[in-house]
Image (cartoon, rainbow, N blue to C red):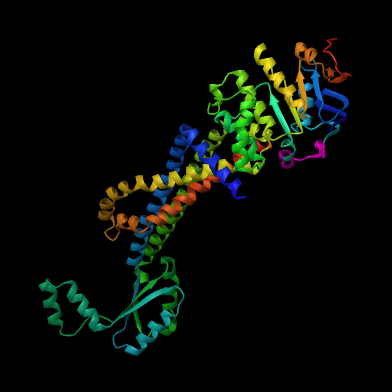
């Protein structure tokens, strides 16, 4: 479903991703690990079309992401659920409206939106917080809104870039449990993290990056720092 | 399609209301631009009226030689009416000239006595010629200077008033050009200030635009609500602009009437209120929409 084929990314003289190749199949849970600056976020940015590779091909399903122009990207992103460390929620909207927004941009009918939005918010543990503005939510709650927004359109893949980076341990495990549950329901999950405990506990496929290179690709892998 | 439009409009109104402080600030700046624009329209009307009143007072007259047959005079009148520069030609016969003269000086016994002593009507038949533009009198005078009219024309007033007419024509031209340049300049300044205000208003939402893109919103879906907000800004500024200008026009109207008695700016304002509102609306909505469009496009490219 996802293929990186000899992908490199260069900013001026600085090559941050070097000749990376891998494939991710539908339904997989993949942890992308490495120290800060290893190239994890750049890899994710190339997958979601925020950055273009300097070399190589990035394939997502039927899309060749590296060849897509700006006007084609919204279509691609509607097949993805994207979660970030800094939540990236619409601050002037409520939790409910943030989720609704994702459905509306995907052109979902109103009746469906009215039915599904409360269900998804309940599923991520935000019952009773529907009408809270983002500023009125804790970090963990914000990330739950982000997950609800990411999963509400039944994406093919959920891409989470350090989703627990700003959270305390309790919320961290709450979020990881949600992501594993989503994966168990059949959605591919890519989790970029440098949290060793998470990677070692969930025991899923691990792609390890160092200095822009993919140095290890293991099924049921561990986070091994070199 | 309709659902998408409804959603875009909904988000537009939501953005407008939830960012009410930014909305108020933007409307105030846009209002300033609208008031400048509206004042320029009204000053333009007053100025144009003043110029046309002066222009109406300018004419040239042709006095005929004593004994010129009336049909010759009327023939010249017809030929003048055929000139493209000529707006109107009035024939004043000897008798009509005398009547007007007496009407003009009804109480002046010295003039009445003098006319009685003369016995005969001393005034000449004449033509009063009005051109479309003061600059055209030169051409009309040149036409009248033709050899073939020398045996019927005694005097052309242009030859005595040439300097004044030319100077007036030049002043009116400069007045119009200065008005146009001033309008253009102030309207541009007002537009630039408004554009920058809208730029800052949208700049505060720059991150949100990025988030919408990540969620998969199309450019039209992102841009749409900002355009709607631009329309609301423009509509509000245009409406408030007319409402706050009205009392000022009402108060200034008597003052202008003293200067230009034929001008009632308050009546003009009332009779053209929808037109003025329409111009305001066009001006403000154009600024609002175009600014929003340009600014959002910049962030969509980034």
Q: Position of residue B25 (x, y in %)?
A: 45, 34
Query: Which residue sits at x=48%, y=45%?
Result: B234
Q: Position of residue B48 (x, y in %)?
A: 38, 58
Residue A202 left/right relative to B178: right
Asked whether B78 falls inside the magenta stretch, the response is: no
Total marks shown come to: 0
Point out the image quarter for the C terminus of chain B. Answer: top right
**Magenta extent:** A61-74
| Along the viewing direction, whichever of B281 and B223 lies nearer the viewer | B223
On screen, residue B138 above or below B3 = below
Residue A75 left/right relative to B144: right
Q: Position of residue A214 (x, y in %)?
A: 87, 20
Query: Which residue sits at x=82%, y=16%?
Result: A203
Q: Position of residue B39 (x, y in %)?
A: 39, 48
Residue B251 shows in this picture? yes
Name of the residue lying farthest toward the top: A226
| Along the viewing direction, whichever of A208 and B248 lies nearer the viewer | A208
On screen, residue A170 above or below B172 = above
| Along the viewing direction, whichever of B114 and A203 lies nearer the viewer | A203
On screen, residue B13 above or below B262 = above
Asked whether A71 falls inside the magenta stretch, the response is: yes
Residue A154 left/right relative to A28: left
Residue B208 shows in this picture? no
């Amino acid at each position: 479903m996802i293929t990186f084929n000899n992908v490199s990314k260069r900013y001026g003289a600085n090559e941050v991703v070097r000749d990376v190749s891998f494939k991710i199949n539908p339904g997989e849970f993949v942890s992308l690990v490495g120290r800060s600056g290893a190239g994890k976020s750049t890899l994710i940015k190339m997958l979601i079309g925020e950055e273009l590779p300097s070399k190589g091909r990035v394939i997502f399903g039927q899309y060749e992401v590296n060849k897509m122009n700006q006007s084609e990207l919204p279509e691609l992103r509607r097949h993805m659920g994207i979660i970030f460390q800094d939540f990236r929620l619409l601050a002037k909207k409520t939790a409910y409206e943030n989720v609704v927004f994702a459905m509306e941009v995907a052109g979902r009918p109103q009746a469906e939106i009215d039915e599904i939005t409360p269900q998804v918010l309940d599923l991520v543990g935000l019952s009773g917080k529907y009408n809270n503005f983002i500023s009125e939510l804790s970090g963990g709650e914000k990330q739950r809104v982000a997950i609800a927004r990411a999963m509400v359109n039944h994406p093919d893949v959920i891409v989470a870039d350090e989703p627990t980076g700003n959270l305390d341990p309790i919320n961290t495990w709450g979020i990881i449990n949600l992501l594993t549950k989503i994966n168990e329901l059949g959605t591919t999950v890519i989790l970029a993290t440098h949290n060793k405990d998470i990677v070692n506990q969930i025991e899923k496929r691990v792609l390890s990056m160092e200095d822009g290179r993919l140095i290890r690709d293991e099924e049921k892998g561990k986070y091994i720092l070199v | 399609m309709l659902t998408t439009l409804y959603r875009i409009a909904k988000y537009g109104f939501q953005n407008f209301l939830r960012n009410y402080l930014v909305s108020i600030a933007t409307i105030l700046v846009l209002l300033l631009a609208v008031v400048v624009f509206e004042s320029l329209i009204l000053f333009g009307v007053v100025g144009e009226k003043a110029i046309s009143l002066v222009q109406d007072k300018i004419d040239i007259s042709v006095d005929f030689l004593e004994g010129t047959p009336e049909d010759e005079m009327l023939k010249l009148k017809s030929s003048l009416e055929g000139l493209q520069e000529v707006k109107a030609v009035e024939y004043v016969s000897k008798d009509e000239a005398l009547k007007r003269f007496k009407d003009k000086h009804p109480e002046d016994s010295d003039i009445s006595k003098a006319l009685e002593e003369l016995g005969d009507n001393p005034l000449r038949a004449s033509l009063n010629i009005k051109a479309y533009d003061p600059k055209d009198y030169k051409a009309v005078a040149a036409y009248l200077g033709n050899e073939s009219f020398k045996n019927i024309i005694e005097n052309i007033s242009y030859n005595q008033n040439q300097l004044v007419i030319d100077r007036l024509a030049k002043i009116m031209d400069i007045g119009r050009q200065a008005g146009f340049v001033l309008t253009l300049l102030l309207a541009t300044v007002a537009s630039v200030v408004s554009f920058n205000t809208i730029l800052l208003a949208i700049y505060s939402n720059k991150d949100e635009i990025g988030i919408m893109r990540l969620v998969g919103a199309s450019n039209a879906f992102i841009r749409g609500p900002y355009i709607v907000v631009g329309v609301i800004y423009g509509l509000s500024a245009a409406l408030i602009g007319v409402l706050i200008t009205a009392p000022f026009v009402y108060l200034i109207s008597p003052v202008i009437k003293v200067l230009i008695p034929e001008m009632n700016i308050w009546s003009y304002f009332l009779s053209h209120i929808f037109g003025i509102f329409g111009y305001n609306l066009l001006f403000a909505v154009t600024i609002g929409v175009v600014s929003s469009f340009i600014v959002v496009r910049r962030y969509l490219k980034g």
